[in-house]
Image (cartoon, grey):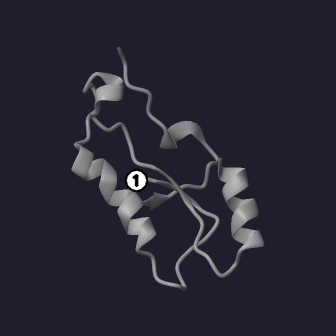
Amino acid sequence: MNAHTRVLAKKYPAFRINCVCPGYVSTGINDHTGVLSVEEGGASPVRLALLPDDGPSGVFFVRSEESSLKGSSDFVVPSS
């Protein structure tokens, strides 16, 4: 997903094209085992949708933080 985001961002420089992982959100798809509320999970995609014209593009965000994707510490898999 991140590679495709970067390709699209380069192809369409007039647009702000980013991807975001909202975190482990408590929803019906995970039987409400997530640690974030729907409101908390929705905050990051909404923030990215409202970026100014000179905002970042071609970037992967974990919640509201820009991710380097150089390590796996950005992603936490919850224990069962």
Seen in the picture, residue 74 relative to 54 is either above or below; the reply is above
Residue found at x 22% / y 43%:
37
Residue 19: x %, y % from top left: 55, 56
Residue found at x 72% / y 64%:
8
Residue found at x 34% / y 25%:
30
Seen in the picture, residue 1 relative to 54 is either above or below; the reply is above
Q: Is 3 positioned to the left or the right of 21 in the image? A: right
Which is nearer the eye, 68 or 44?
44
Read off the residue under disc 1: 63
Which is nearer the eye, 24 or 14?
14
**Dividing the picture into quarters, in which one does residue 65 lie?**
bottom left
Quadrant of image for the C terminus: top left
Looking at the rendered structure, the secondary structure element under dot 1 is: loop
Seen in the picture, residue 10 relative to 70 is either above or below; the reply is below
Residue found at x 71% / y 61%:
6
What's the amino acid at mark 1? Arg
